[in-house]
């Protein structure tokens, strides 16, 4: 990222500002926005927003919630830091980091933002975490949410399903996720209860009595589909053998462990 210039705060007319097209945040709680607007009426905008100059005015990079609340409060100008040194990709990172630090994004907005960051710079989960000031586990857990069915993503964003539930559901086939999400909501399942129920169903389906080599290949295919990675099974005539699970990264291993119900928590 470019070297940061000297920070200069200036008052910018609110009507010359437009939200950036790459803003990670899309949802703004109406009640919280009204509360912030009332605070701004009383005390003004405490922290400047971040802008970038455009031919038509100013592009908003960070601080959209403050900008919206200032509009509601009837302000004509707002304090801002101008960052004309940033490229489009760097501008996206600035906005994403601020929103993550303020924890102002919904879970799916966080997941989409982190995914975009990984695509822009081709980063590992650990490198993404270093860039935004979060742990590798934080990044991996949120990126798993991308695997959720759209209906389940909406339930996560609305707070009907917690992040812990979502992490477990993301390891299930799409066609099963909605049913399990409904179970969580209707029966008020904890994360541990959900894991146990899924494990019980999974275990009840794996009944295997091999009679020919093709059976072993079918088992390998079924287990590979279940775990999302390559599985090899070998055994002698007495039934003694090995089960090998191949993974290509620690992130992929995390996904396998989640699917078999293991948690280090």
Image (tube, rainbow, N blue to C red):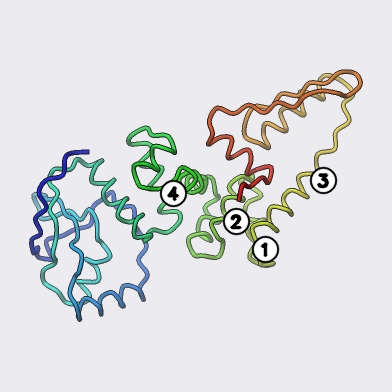
**Alpha-carbon span between mark 2 and mark 1:** 9 Å
Q: Which mark is residue 204?
A: 3
Give whichever of 175, 63 is nearer the camera: 63
Q: Secondary structure at mark 2?
A: helix
**Alpha-carbon span between mark 1 and mark 3:** 20 Å
Q: Which mark is residue 223?
A: none
Q: Secondary structure at mark 3?
A: helix
Q: The N terminus lies in which quarter of the figure?
A: top left
Q: Which residue is mark 1?
A: 189
Tag 2–tag 1 contact (CB < 8 Å):
yes
Q: Earlier in the sequence, mark 4 or mark 2?
A: 4
Q: Within 10 Å of the Cα at label 2, are there few (<14), some (14-19), or many (20+) other Cα atoms?
A: many
Q: Which residue is mark 2?
A: 165
**Alpha-carbon span between mark 4 and mark 2:** 15 Å
Q: Residue at x 33, y 36 (%)?
A: 120
Q: Earlier in the sequence, mark 2 or mark 3?
A: 2
Q: Which residue is mark 4?
A: 111
Q: Earlier in the sequence, mark 4 or mark 3?
A: 4
Q: Is residue 235 left or right of residue 185?
A: right
Q: Residue at x 26, y 49 (%)?
A: 94
**Alpha-carbon span between mark 4 and mark 3:** 33 Å
Which quarter of the figure has residue 49? bottom left
Q: Secondary structure at mark 1?
A: loop
Query: Residue farthest to the front?
Result: 265
Which quarter of the figure has residue 221? top right
Give whichever of 215, 115 is nearer the camera: 115
**Alpha-carbon span between mark 1 and mark 4:** 24 Å
**Alpha-carbon span between mark 2 and mark 3:** 22 Å
Q: Secondary structure at mark 4?
A: helix
Q: Is residue 111 left or right of residue 66?
A: right
């Amino acid at each position: 990222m470019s070297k940061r210039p000297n920070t200069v705060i200036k008052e910018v007319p609110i009507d010359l500002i437009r939200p950036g097209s790459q803003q990670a945040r899309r949802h703004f709680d109406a009640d919280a926005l009204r509360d912030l607007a009332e605070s701004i009426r009383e005390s003004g905008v405490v922290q400047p927003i971040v802008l970038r100059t455009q031919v038509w005015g100013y592009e908003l990079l960070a601080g959209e919630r403050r900008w919206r609340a200032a509009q509601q409060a009837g302000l004509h100008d707002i304090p801002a830091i101008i960052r004309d040194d940033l490229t489009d990709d760097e501008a996206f990172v600035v906005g994403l980091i601020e929103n993550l630090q303020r924890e102002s994004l919904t879970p799916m907005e966080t997941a989409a933002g982190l995914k975009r960051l990984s695509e822009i710079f081709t980063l590992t989960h650990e490198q993404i975490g270093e860039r935004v000031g979060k742990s590798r586990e934080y990044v991996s857990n949120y990126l798993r949410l991308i695997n959720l069915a759209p209906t389940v993503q909406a339930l996560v964003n609305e707070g009907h399903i917690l992040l812990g539930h979502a992490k477990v559901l993301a390891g299930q086939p799409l066609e099963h996720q909605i049913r399990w999400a409904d179970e969580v909501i209707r029966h008020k399942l904890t994360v541990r209860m959900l894991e146990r129920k899924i494990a019980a169903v999974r275990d009840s389906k794996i009944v295997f009595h091999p009679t020919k080599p093709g059976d072993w290949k079918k088992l390998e295919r079924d287990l590979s589909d279940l775990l999302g990675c390559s599985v090899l099974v070998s055994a002698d005539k007495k039934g003694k053998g090995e089960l090998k699970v191949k993974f290509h990264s620690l992130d992929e291993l995390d996904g396998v462990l989640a699917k078999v119900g293991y948690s280090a928590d």
